[in-house]
Amino acid sequence: MDEDDEHMMQIKIQAIKKLNVWFRSSNGIINRIFTQKAPVFGLVIVALIIFIAIAASVIAPNDPLKVNMSMRLEGPSSLYWLGTDNLGRCIASRLIWGARMSLIYSLCVLGLMMVISIPIGLLSGYAGGRVDTFIMRVTDIFLSLPTFLMALAIAGTLGPSAKNMIIAMASVWWSSYARIIRGMAMQMKQQDFILAAKAAACTHSQIIFRHILRNIASPIIIMATLEIGSIILAIASFSFIGLGAQPPTPEWGIMLSDSKEFIQTQPQLMIYPGIAIIITVMAFNLLGEGLKNAIQD
Amino acid sequence: MEVLAETLNIRKSYEKQNLFSKKKEKVPAVNGVSLKIQKGCSVGLVGESGSGKSTLGRMMAGLETPTEGQVLFRGQSISNISLRKMRPLRRNIQMIFQNSSSVFDPSYTIGESIAEVIKNSEKVSKKECLGKIETILEQVGLDTSYAQRYPKELSGGQRQRANIARALVLHPEFVVCDEPVSSLDYSLRKQVLTLLNDLRNKFGITYLFITHDLNCVPYVCDIMAIMYAGKIVEQIDLKNNSMQNTLHPYTSLLFSCIPAKVPAERKKCTIESIIDTTVIPDSNHCCRFFLRCPHYTERCINEEPLLKEVANGHFVACHIV
């Protein structure tokens, strides 16, 4: 009996050791590439993009709006780092200013979304009952509207512009956030420390803002970081189809749209803004994932 | 003597939603309790798990609304008033919670949590507030440096003491203690009970002391109330009566379950013919204990026993007594 037990034990220990080697080696690689280096990589790129956006007027070698018809579709040179587009504008300068535009637009959308969804989600989750049911049905209505249709409708009535695009996006996208925040608020509301806060004579607003919001702030920040990537992408697509920022604004989506006629002869016109979008979106996603992992541990 | 807190036949039942039927099932927790707590006369509430002690405690602390009946504090109903109206009363009604691991907001330090209680009820300067926090932490036996720690950085016993400190920092008149010492080891238990006693003598605090440890009761309380299935079945004034002098069969069962101190006196923890069941009959027209009772009669099945005074300050709800 004892020998049997010991034998089983040996087998188990060996199995665990084997597993460990596997796990550690694969975990090690995953760790190095994805969980440890990636968020730092993302953070560096995000910081770089933010720096570029802030210092755009200093960094950009040329005026992004200056048309020079004698220098159309030129290759890279010391004056035009990445060459010029079909109107002779400096591509590098437009990309740099585009970073500023993308960040400003996406932060506007994000801010507007948060301003709408946080109070609504908190109220709905905390109040519960009929208030919750009513708010959630309204949210469902907004949730069912397709963003692009909404943007088309707003652009059709108010005219296409960056401002209207921001309104269209925020007015549709807040609903999914309100739902998530409501769920988190409901979960928090059932915690014992909320009862303790009531015993400590806290008012409803104190409970909502000082206890519930404070405890769900970090998941909200993570969500926001993860969302910026897709917002930037959506802004570029809106501008591409002509519903967002209007030419000649230096914006990545517009640059793509402007250069689509030259895709066969001058493909680099599309490749540059495309790469800029990919890098930005990827950087924000890496940063968001990293934050998520860091906070969940 | 002045009546501090009082319940008038309160009931609380929780609703259980069935998945497929619309009908909601009602699960009664407290089933018609009338309890008077006089100032300076602490009550020990004893009973098994699920007997409704904590629910009764939370209702008396004004943290839960009874389904029926009223809770009065100094003659004022607190069972159905808003948080805002409750606010001025909170200074005098506090609660020591059972589960100290989850009653502190994880994003607050212990000091911030205690300061919140003080700031909500009193207008004090930052310095006075800090002074109060340090005094109470010292009184419960915690180093003052713990004020800067987060709840997860404290051990269970330390958290429980911080929990007690938070409830007692304002020296309230009435404190509901929901098993304040059950998570503490014996040396600490004695220390905390002594602390509760000291503070009671010093500031005239009255406790509703919820526990399942019968040994704690005479140490802190003047009256012992035994709860079974959401009802008080026996209430003894410990000043005039001996604690051993119990009459209700359920109380006898409880007392027989205290482990013996002398090995020679060890016994099996059962009364003869106690039926080994924890089923509680689902009717309001019978004694809720009769299925486990060794002496039940026809009357126990058909009629609900009411609390009646059998001796000075000794109430029992049983047909046989």
Image (cartoon, rainbow, N blue to C red):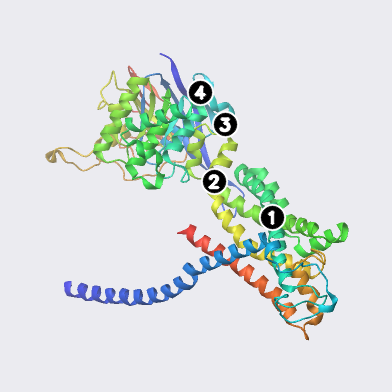
Q: Chain of mark 3?
A: B
In this rendering, do the residues under marks 3 and 1 share a single chain?
A: no
Type of amino acid at the residue the image marks with label 2: Arg
Which residue is disc 1 drawn over? A175
* Circle number at residue A214: 2
Q: Quadrant of the C terminus of chain B?
A: top left
Mark 4 is surrounded, within 10 Å at the Cα level, by few (under 14), some (14 to 19) or many (20 or more) other residues, namely some
For the view shown, which residue lies furthest in the front direction? A78
Going by the numbered disc 1, the residue's amino acid type is: Ser
| Depicted A54 relative to depicted A261: above or below | above
For marks 3 and 1, give the one nearer the viewer: 1
Kindly report the distance in space between the C-alpha atoms of the residues bearing marks 3 and 4.
16 Å
Under circle 2, the secondary element is: helix
Q: Which residue is mark 4?
A: B72
| Label 3 crowd (10 A; few <14 / some 14-19 / many >=20) | some
Tell me which numbered mark, 2 or 1, is placed earlier along the sequence.
Answer: 1
